[in-house]
Image (cartoon, helix red, strand yellow):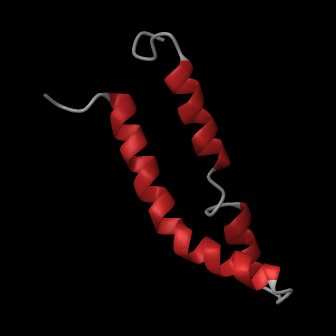
Amino acid sequence: MGLKPLEILKKGLKILKKEVKTKKEHLQAQLAAWKPISVEDEAWFDHEGNLVDFEAVMDSLETASDYERG
């Protein structure tokens, strides 16, 4: 049996979190040491490295009574 849509999204979010983890930890360490980061890294942190919106959508879908029917 195939994965349900919510399971596919969870799996994708887990993969995405792994992909950004290393860079995010590196940038956080630089900031904690009061070292500057580049404008590009700031933009990455604010956009590609920020998974809050994705996590909020997942939380909403998980708590929905029946996400498949709408």
State the image coordinates of residue 33 (x, y, percent, origin top left): 81, 86
Residue at the image position 41 percent from the left and 39 percent from the top: 9
Above-or-below relation of 4 to 29:
above
Above-or-below relation of 10 to 33:
above
Above-or-below relation of 21 to 17:
below
State the image coordinates of residue 36 (x, y, percent, origin top left): 83, 88
Residue at the image position 62 percent from the left and 52 percent from the top: 51
Residue at the image position 35 percent from the left and 34 percent from the top: 7
Q: Residue furthest right?
A: 34
* Quarter in which the N terminus is drawn: top left
State the image coordinates of residue 68 (x, y, percent, origin top left): 39, 16
Report the front residue among 46 and 23. Answer: 23
Quarter of the image where one finds residue 53: top right
Q: Residue furthest bottom?
A: 35
Give the total of numbered labels: 0
Q: Confirm whether residue 38 shows in the render.
A: no
Q: Residue furthest left?
A: 1
Quarter of the image where one finds residue 30: bottom right
Residue at the image position 59 percent from the left and 42 percent from the top: 55
- For this view, does 2 lie left or right of residue 62? left
Q: Confirm whether residue 64 shows in the render.
A: yes
- For this view, does 60 lie left or right of residue 45? left
